Image: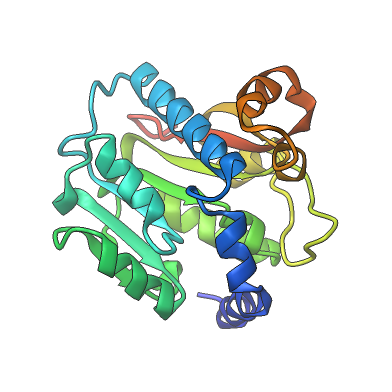
Amino acid sequence: MNTSETQAVQARYARRDNSADAQRYSLYANAAALQAQQERLRAMARLWCAHGWTDLSGRTLLEVGCGSGGNLLDLLRLGATPTQLTGIELLPERAAAARAVLPGGVTVLEGDACAAPIADASQQAVLAFTVFSSLLDPAYRQQFARTLWRWVAPGGGVLVYDFVVNNPHNPDVRKLPLSELRALFPCARLQSRRLTLAPPVARRLPTGLIAPASLLLHPLRTHRLTWAVKPLTPP
């Protein structure tokens, strides 16, 4: 556990304007955010179906950096079992918000993920959505990746959704290129695809044009969804 990096992450989130973020990422008020979420869910379902998972029922699934619980709710809608679902959140107020909206069977842990009491090889999928990009210390990124990989059962994987380009307006995040993902999970078999039309572009488009524009303007996709699969037997 790197206490200094954990404190730095907390400070970066505290600098953000939460009210502005709420509008920017609201699925109700922002058509671009809704399109990005739906596109990501379809891509997740395709990846897992191709992996041989016909459903999510009974599967042990964990999200690191679960925020106020939005992605965990999406997993429930996709068929995940509440008692097999875990979220970990660093910020106490976000963890409390997640507990308020999620079913009682879902476990929400608070604190540094690298210190969380998760058993080795206990999870079939570990999700980290826009988490690595908030970890600016390369050594802590490596420690974080090793922790997630340790939790994953053989045949399962780590699902990463994150920036592949830097945001010139936000120095508190750093891109996560595919080459670095390969280095962070050297034993994994990676399946990856670019997603999410650049939000500043998508927010300026009429609602009906966002989805086709995302398909056509592939170079303007700013994120990557990667399924890093752990081999059934050690290499």
Most foreground residue, 62 or 223: 223
> In percent of the image, x 73 and y 23: which residue is there?
218
The percent position of residue 203, horizontal first and vertical second, equals 70, 43
The number of numbered badges drawn on the structure is 0
**In this view, 230 is above or below 68:** above
The percent position of residue 88, horizontal first and vertical second, equals 37, 64
Most foreground residue, 177 or 73: 73
**In this view, 133 is above or below 30:** below
| Visible residue check, residue 121 | yes
**In this view, 53 is above or below 153:** above
**In this view, 206 is above or below 200:** above
Most foreground residue, 49 or 16: 16
Q: Is residue 193 left or right of residue 91?
A: right
Q: Quadrant of residue 111?
A: bottom left
Q: Is residue 117 left or right of residue 140?
A: left
The percent position of residue 197, horizontal first and vertical second, equals 69, 34
